[in-house]
Amino acid sequence: MMDTKWTAQMRGQIRTLAQLEAHIDLTTDERQALEVLASRFRLGISPYYLGLIDPKDPDCPIRRQAIPRMAEGELAVGEMEDPLAEDRDMPSPALTRRYPNRALFYVTHTCAVYCRHCTRRRKVSDPGSAVRKSQWQAAADWLKEHPEVDDLVISGGDPLTLSDKKIEELLVTVRPHVSIIRIGTRQPTTLPQRITPELCELLARFQPIYIMTHFNHPKECTPEAAQALESLANAGCVLSNQAVLMRGINDNAEVLSQLHKWLLAHRCRPYRLYHCDYTEGTQQFRTPFSKGLEIMRSLRGPSSGLGMPEYMVDLPHGWGKVLVSEGVRIDEDWKFTNWEGHEMLLEQDGLGAVRKL
């Protein structure tokens, strides 16, 4: 019987080829990827999330997100280690500032599942990227000196892999300096057991807290996940979902419609649908802008406004997020203008090179 305690789930994380082979009929490609690519981006799957994988189907959407393929080792044109230039724009260690009133705080390198489409694979799963306690205070000191930054995204890794005590210490440290706290977490998806009554009582003390979840497919929409969302909402958290549009996983209007309706039923609004970032090894997931816009048009009629996320691309080189619909198509390329007026060309319908204009 699966241990439902979240700490046991973390200790029981599947981390090796041998462990995975005991549960999944691996393809030759998957087995080779696990042997060859382990040093680039570690394997990590919670027993709960492993239980959602079809062991016989290589195209299972959960499996595709959690188990590497050899395509992950290929560097496509336009891909880069830090596509959003987060490490460049750090005014304080682990704190990235991209917009006038907002900042992102990277607090841990740990996740319950190391998603193969991860934007921060250069750091996530790497113990060397662990954030020290002193950096928490340094970030708080910087926030105190910059009151114009009133919106803080706490991210990682997954902040909810921290213990309740550490989460409390973190919130005590930063809450006096910002009015909006957002926590980016995939725990309701990959380890819903983490959303305990004790955690919810803790979060209720620091409201308002905005929880940004990451569900990508209806197979992730389980009774356990529903309970996690309900518990967070009952604690006063405002829930929004940020999905990534991925080829062969959820690039289908019917699939996304099912996902969005389930989210709304459990008080989580479909907030954004992202073009897959230009992170090294993620070309296999990237979907053309034209297809993404076609999917959005197909969703428009059957879905209310509540069920319609914004379809976004986070421009490489740290130029920020823009609506795909605001891009200008030039033959097979797309030109985008960011909030500061800078222009960028994303070639081949979003699948090719990246050029600043």
Image (cartoon, rainbow, N blue to C red):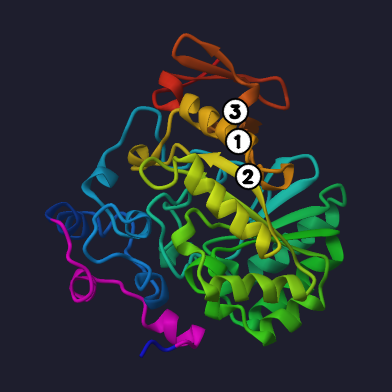
Q: What is the spatial separation of the Cα atoms under label 2 and label 3, in whole angstroms?
A: 11 Å
Secondary structure at numbered mark 2: strand
- Image point (64%, 35%), residue name: 301
Please report contact status of discs 2 and 3: CB closer than 8 Å, yes or no: no
Q: Is residue 141 left or right of residue 119?
A: right
As for residue 25 lying within the magenta part, the answer is: yes
Tell me, for residue 312, which label it has, or none.
1
Residue position marked by numbered label 2 in the rendering:
272
Secondary structure at numbered mark 3: helix
Circle nearer the N terminus (2, 1): 2
Residue position marked by numbered label 3 in the rendering:
324
Please report contact status of discs 2 and 1: CB closer than 8 Å, yes or no: yes
Q: Position of residue 271 (x, y in %)?
A: 67, 48
The residue positioned farthest toward the front in the image shown: 302
Identify residue type, mark 2.
Arg
Q: Taking 252 as reference, is 173 above or below it?
A: below
Label 3: few (<14), some or many (≥20) within 10 Å? many
Identify residue type, mark 3.
Val
Magenta stretch, residue numbers = 4-27
- Image point (20%, 69%), residue name: 17
Secondary structure at numbered mark 1: strand
Q: What is the spatial separation of the Cα atoms under label 2 and label 1, in whole angstroms?
A: 7 Å
